[in-house]
Amino acid sequence: MIPRMDVPEELVEVGRRQAGAVSRQQILRYGVSDDVTGRLVSSGQWRRLALGIYAMGADTWIQRVWAGLLIGGKHAVVGLKAAAKLWNLPIDKGRWERDDPPIEIFVGRNHGVINSTDWWRFVRADREGQSVPRRTSIAQTIVDLSQTMTGDQMASLVGQAVSHHRVSPNDIRAVLNTTARHKQRTLLADIVSDTADGVTSALEWHYVHDVEHAHGLPHARRQAKPVAIFTVDNFYEEYGVIVELDSKAYHRGVAASQDLERDRIHERNGYLTLRFTWADVVDHPCQTAAQVAATLSVQGWRGALTHCPRCSGQRV
């Protein structure tokens, strides 16, 4: 006799909630025998994803995420780049449109070893899970990812996550403070502090450290509104000077017109605007610092430009 292949609606609903992935334990719980499961696989209605893990629907990245959690067990939590994608954090987003990130699953420190595959990497470490599917918190995800990031990548990730109100600097600090070992603890802590001060991008981070701090310039207000209309990157309020940072070499069309209009409005209100690109700030920070210092001096600053170790190699 051919076994019946009816699938209880309750099990179908479990599959829907898990992007089509179900475990053998869940299947048996709803009265579907191993024989019926085998027939469903043989007929092509289901697919076997891993030992004891089956797929009811089409193959998707999120289905593999759920499968990884089912393999990992009750303490399993999605982490690192997969968690970043689930939270829609700004990291490798262009790449993810072409290639999905690897799925890394924290399974708990006391879990037995699970062999990794092309789809999953299992990490024996403890993590708290949030949301559905279970993943590390945004703050924990940032702290974990930052261990292998450059300063630019870290500043961009932290700045955008905070400026878009996804997480607070204090949330990140709290996780970092409870992390026993972190390869870049000091750098991440500095970036979080800068972000709390209003730094929202890698370019702004470079300006603060390589231009302003390195050359003894006064401290600007970040993300300020000199005339309560436009937010500016850096505002030297005492001297009426605005420094705007553009990641592109120049703007075209509407963007360029908007920049000019902003500058005109600020000028009518007594403020001077300086604009710098990535090349100005990152490749020629000493020349940029000299330009800012000269403008501030005209506006009443009585400080002196400090020479940094790079100044001898640049014409300032």
Image (spheres, helix red, strand yellow):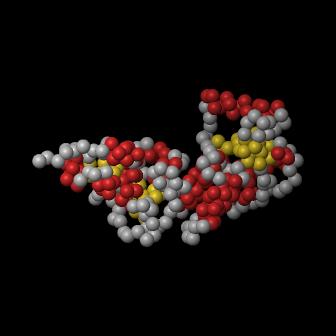
Residue at 84%, 36% in the rendered image: 270
Depicted 131 relative to depicted 106: above or below = above
| Left or right, residue 8 beside residue 80 | left
In front: 153, or 185? 185
Which residue does the image show at 63% across and 66% down from the upper left?
177
> Can residue 64 be seen in this snapshot?
yes
Residue 171 sits in which quadrant?
bottom right
Question: Horizontal and vertical percent for residue 25?
Answer: 32, 57
In this rendering, the answer to whether 4 lies above or below 141 is: above
Q: Nearer the viewer, residue 33 or 38?
A: 33
Name the residue rendered at 55%, 55% in the picture: 137
Indicate left or right for 207 with 219 as reference.
left
The mark total stands at 0
Residue closest to the eye, 90 or 128: 128
| 248 left or right, relative to 226 | left
Residue 194 percent location from the top left of the image: 69, 55
Q: Quadrant of residue 179?
A: bottom right
